[in-house]
Amino acid sequence: MMQSSSPKWRWFVAIGSAMMAVGTLASALLWSVIFDSILQSQLALIPGSRSYQIWLAPSVPLYFEIYLFNWTNSETFPIDKPHLVQTGPYRFREHREHVNVTWNQEEHTLGYRTFRSWVFDETSEGNLDDIITTVDVITASAVHRERPNQSHFEQYMFSLFLKNTFTGHRVPVTRTARELLFEGYSDWLLTLAQVMPDDSGAPKLDKFGWFYQRNNSLETEGYMEVTTGEVSGTLPGQIVRWNHEDHLVYYEGQCSRLSGSVGEFLPRNLSEHSELTMFLPDLCRTVVLPYLHSGQVLGLNYHKFGMSASSFDNSTASSDNSCFCNGPCEWGGVMNVSACRFNSPSFVTLPHFLHADPRLKELVTGLEPDPEKHTFYFAVEPRLGVPVDVAARFQINIYLEPDNGLYLNVPKMLFPVFWIQQRVLIDEKTADELAMVRNILDWGATFCVGTALAFAIAAAVATCNCCRRKKPDYIKPKNVCEKLKDDAEIKLNPI
């Protein structure tokens, strides 16, 4: 008798299901590797990637806020400590665009400049016509730049010259907020500087303003060259060269090291033991942001990394950072940026001297440091490395020290002038997209395991059907002897 054969399609189903089960199981085991590979291709700064298009012209609303300190008792200085009243914020809507992009295929980097423009926002609490009294930065810079090259007598004569020439120069100056910020104001010292020889490389300006000629400019951050992230194991947006240099020319030793993210792309798989290394062109240096705490925003978990007392350390906490000093270096929590500001007496701290040497705050009144309001931080979705809440904050201070002329009896101090804040918070649409991506990452392997199990069951069922025998559709005929035997038994045993 011949056995009935199973339909061929059942064998195809069994074999195909088995292969799919093996494939999806392998995908489950390698899900993190597959996901990271796909994510890296989308994050890479290469033409065609989604990140590159967003990076060229960010659509996230950006605001640039400036808080000025108004010096209310300048007429009694230095007898009385400066009393400072914070005004603002003076809020500007910022437009940012990366332009002049060039590619280095051999090193997998791209170079660019950043075009930035600011428009005054009507929601600003500060008015650009506000009258502000602050320290005379032009005079302080002139004294600071000339002091190393002069004897004590020459310094004294120079101070008298500044004090008595033309309308005179004193420690304070009173101007409108618009003049101090973007519009600028004229000064005879600037006119004199335009005709005097100068080898510092400082631009010859006809006016002074903290952001004068920086609006609608390509020079705000300088030339940047960063990694594209297209090579496996590398991240996009990591600084390689700044102003065509692969190190910081203002410092020596390890302080000249140029490294870290420029802020738009951060490492993935961050933990409570991680640190963020950031390059900040406004500070002309790389800083390390330690882990602060974790939280949640718009349903997304984050790790927050921010500046601490050690972030601006210049040798107070560690002698390894003494190469950052470049002159006065006696306060912790302070960054001397004079070297990259054409030798002007500019020093950077966190707002209101947060985390800085307490002696600095004792020399003024009116400052109230608050970690909630004045911390510089990046809150990052840890697995994807995407910033979800950023507050870039720092304060500009002018260094003053006594002399025998203009600054007679002036204490050695850092005079707070203003602090800025750039705040970026993701919107609900972006948060929902990130949540979806994170769910794919978290549950993708589980889904693959479930799919593999379903295919395995299908393969098993199909295989059993193929191996099952069909029932015979006829009865085996009896032979003659068996038939005669049955007839005899019927006769002997009638019913």
Image: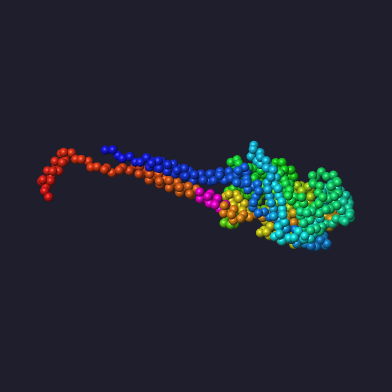
* In-image side of 117 versus 39 (left or right): right
Residue at x 40% of width, y 44% of height = 459
Identify which residue, 356 or 168, lies in the foreground: 168
* In-image side of 165 versus 467 (left or right): right
What is the quadrant of residue 456 in the picture?
top left
- Is any part of residue 261 visible from this angle? no
Horizontal and vertical percent position of residue 375: 67, 56
Horizontal and vertical percent position of residue 332: 72, 53
Identify which residue, 442 or 175, lies in the foreground: 175
Q: How is the image coloured?
A: rainbow
Which residue lies most toward the left here? 492
Is residue 12 positioned above or below 126 on the image?
above
- Is any part of residue 249 visible from this angle? yes
Identify which residue, 432 or 227, lies in the foreground: 432
Horizontal and vertical percent position of residue 284: 72, 47
* In-image side of 434 versus 485 (left or right): right
Query: Is 105 one of the magenta-colored residues?
Result: no
Q: Which residue range is magenta in the image?
A: 434-444
